[in-house]
Amino acid sequence: MLMAATVSRAEENVIVAHGISTFGDLKYPADFAHLDYVNPDAPKGGEISEWSFGGFDSLNPFTIKGRGAALSTIMLETLMEGTADEVDAVYCLVCSTIEYPEDRSWVIFNLRPEARFSDGTPLTADDVLFSYETFLTKGLSSFRAVLSQQVESAEVIEPHRIKFTFRPDFPKRDLIQSVGGLPIFSKAEFEAKGRDLEETSIEPYIGSGPYMFDSMEVGQRIVYSRNPDYWGKDLPINIGRHNFDRIRIEYFGDYDAAFEGFKAGAYTFRNEASSLIWATRYDFPALQKGWVVKATPEDGTIANGQSFVINLRREKFQDPRVREAIALMFNFEWSNETLFYGLYNRINSFWENSELAATGLPSPEELAVLEPLKEQLPPGVLDSEPVMAPVSGANQMDRGNLRKAAALLDEAGWPVGNDGMRRNAAGETLVVDFLNDSQTFDRVINPFVENLRRLGVDARHNRVDNAQLVNRERSHDFDITTANFPMGYTPGSGLQQYFGSKSGDDAFNSAGLADPAVDQLISIVEAAETREDLHAAVKALDRVLRAHRFWVPQWFKNVHTIAYYDMYEHPETLPPYALGELDFWWYNAEKGEKLKAAGAF
């Protein structure tokens, strides 16, 4: 429960607390010993290693230039941090307490005087202010735009006290959490090295976190080591966490090469993303000998919104009938049975696998949100069930969906010509180009392309390397690409980056959606003051986003499919919102030595 002192200051009730929750009380009191889901006696030591796809050429993920290395911000801490067993609470980390009025119009962070960067220099309020001002003027444009809407001013009060005052016209619900979640740079290090947040760099950051940069082979491998002098290792929020001495990431060009590397012991923990590999290839010697554990712990997180995303910036995709016709040609049911061994469920909602997903007809609460916007809404939002992904039959080509798609394209002005290809009134063929950098995804996209060509669409599968894909997605040079829409249980201003009109030129808004009704609904979500109001507003937004049909939703599973060398352990009960292998798992040295002696790696 929330345990916070309330004091009177200049006739204003000021709350002093160790954390804050968007709605309701905090789970952990101010004197908590450790998080419930950790092992407080977990030993320190050993290494955990995972794989990543493609390569990297930068250690700065805050710019659209280059491709940032995995975990390249691991050394940067924030004033406050969330937990894996609450959806909308954050607790002090670099700060010791926060002070704020009941209306949350401002906040003071009281920093821990013992906080230090890994080079031994103190972390002060000046570093926090410098970091805020850097994010306000540099880096991703959509983030800058949102931050400038939220904060009116920031000022250092004392060396370890900083105050943020929020704009009066912006909803205050999540703003303390937002500024409390900004990464903290070392001002001295930035100035000494002339860093620019908008430029690519292979110079690692100096941070105050439990891990530091260790070594790398650019594009191939990066290693982080635990800081033995980490200032915050004994804080209650850190007890039982950050247990590995080293975290190593190995890069591979494709899934097959990465799997072969895992079998050979080149890395030791694999979160399997290929259903084909999971279903057919986990019979290798290391597994048979008991060296490798295969497990499926439950995953209580919201599905990540993985989907084929249609680029609305292209004129040919402006008509929603064209987008609907394209979606009808992806046969998930056949793909799941034939390609995925029945391991997946279909995504329908941007908040799939949660109570925030819209279902059935709009509730009275949802209608209260939607009806003032009725003149701007896509057809059917107010009086129909939400748009669902098409259901197909057992054959790759579903003839019923083919007929529906053909009728839609005819109506949209793309009839079939004498050569079987669809053309508009200007004689242009309907070209649909799929951008893809993954060999594993070929088997998913090729049948989709074949179905579209049966429809008369000039569909093409354009295989590019990883660097080309990143550059083309960032410059919006694609027809269809695969992207994710990771949503939270308490969505707020981040929605502007994925769906807001002002973020149309940003990398996060992959579809290029720009709709005043969506902007208004995002504002309502941001302003919701109760969990009930939030749920109604999110479900209303979900309905409208799905009605725009700018995505062809793919699939998800509600379990983690993981495999790892049997030298890692975790608490018996995992938290609902994180697997946490890099966070609160640990290394069993005795098991590790036995595996090495047996020749496992």
Image (spheres, grey):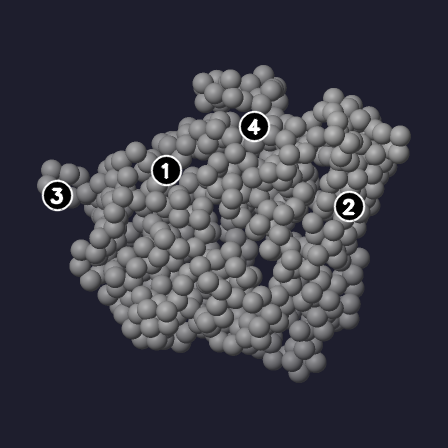
Can residue 123 be seen in this snapshot? Answer: yes
Residue, x 45% and y 70% (percent of image)?
A: 204
Q: What residue type is labelled 4?
A: Arg
Query: Which quadrant: the N terminus?
Result: top left
Q: Write down the quadrant of residue 120 in the picture.
A: bottom left
In terms of secondary structure, where does tag 1 sit? loop
Q: Name the residue under label 4.
A: 543
Q: Mark 2 points at which residue?
A: 460
Q: What x and y, as percent, mark residue 597?
A: 66, 83
Can residue 39 be seen in this snapshot? Answer: no
Front in this rendered view, residue 25 or 536? 536
Residue, x 66% and y 73% (percent of image)?
A: 266
In the rendering, which numbered label is found on residue 23? 1
Q: What residue type is labelled 2?
A: Arg
Q: Write down the quadrant of residue 78 in the picture.
A: bottom left
In front of the other: label 4 or label 2? 2
Q: Name the residue under label 3.
A: 9
